[in-house]
Amino acid sequence: MADRESAGVALWRVPVTGANAAAAAAAATRLLDRAELARAAAFRRPVDRTLYEVAHVALRTVLAERLGARPAELRFGQGPCPGCGEPHGRPEVAGPVEFSLSHAAGLAVIALADTPVGVDVEGREVFAGQAGQEVAGMLHPAERAELDRVGASAPDRWSAAALRCWVRKEAYLKGTGIGLGRGAGAEYVGVGPGFGAVAEGPAAPAGWQVHAVEVPEQYDAAVAVLAPAEPRLAVTVRELALS
């Protein structure tokens, strides 16, 4: 477990291996609450149920270690939405920690920080072909312009740039607690560094840092954390084994 550095973000990659799936299935009835167990049971496909169990057993494991609590004793809630004030904002747990969870087929990613944080992971196949064009069409006009520049200068990198922009956007919106309620094009987050796309403009929304997250090559991921632009926060990434 990472030591509690207030100036950093701790992330865990949790792959859905055979060992992690077996460990999560064995622990689920002991650690998950009734609502989580009901959601797990509602999945029709066993692969989706396994991913959910792995992700949520892992979340309770890392939170409990950070808070010095027992995983089964954690109680989750949701904060107020910044837009309407209703209780469907960021997920919360009692204790001095902020967290975010995301998962795509075969992989969960968890982020912990001392300030509001959001994480998103997506599989690269999501942005293959026409589907990527349709999703990119929902982005902020300045983000679409950045992707147009990538497409003109390096068309083979367009899908990767579109996916990077999307995970950055999702991470930021999850961190704020707004989610996609206002639409993906309401705020600018940008493609970020590494694609040569930004002409002018901020690297991230004011008051937030957005970082790429190292994940296996079939995915892309990003984390957004409420923090001044400088200094850049340390981001640690570890792989978690549940067994």
Image (cartoon, grey):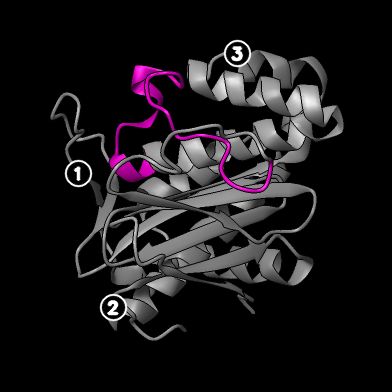
Mark 3 packing: few (<14 Cα in 10 Å), some, or many (20+)?
Answer: some
> What amino acid is found at the position of numbered circle 2 in the picture?
Leu
Which quadrant: the C terminus? bottom right
Q: Residue furthest front?
A: 199
Residue 70 seen by the camera: no
Chain-order first, disc 3 or disc 1:
1
Q: Mark 1: which secondary structure? A: loop
Q: Tell me, for residue 67, which label it has, or none.
A: 2
Please determine whether, in this image, residue 226 is positioned above or below residue 23.
above
Residue at the image position 51 percent from the left and 67 percent from the top: 11
Residue bearing the label numbered 1 = 79
Main SS, magenta region, reads: loop
> What amino acid is found at the position of numbered circle 1 in the picture?
Gly
Q: Mark 3: which secondary structure? A: loop
Residue 223 pos. (x, y %) = 48, 53
Please determine whether, in this image, residue 35 is positioned above or below residue 230.
above
Residue 144 lies in quadrant: top right
Residue 191 pos. (x, y %) = 58, 36
Task: Identify which residue, 107 or 126, lies in the foreground.
Answer: 126
Residue at the image position 62 percent from the left and 19 percent from the top: 135
Q: Which residues are magenta?
A: 174-195
Q: CA distance from mark 3 to mark 1?
A: 30 Å
Residue at the image position 69 percent from the left and 59 percent from the top: 215
Please determine whether, in this image, residue 232 is positioned above or below residue 6.
above
51 horizontally vs 92: left or right = right
Mark 2 packing: few (<14 Cα in 10 Å), some, or many (20+)?
Answer: some
Marks 2/3 in contact by CB < 8 Å: the verdict is no
Chain-order first, disc 2 or disc 3:
2
Q: Tell me, for residue 137, which label it has, or none.
A: 3
Q: CA distance from mark 2 to mark 1?
A: 19 Å
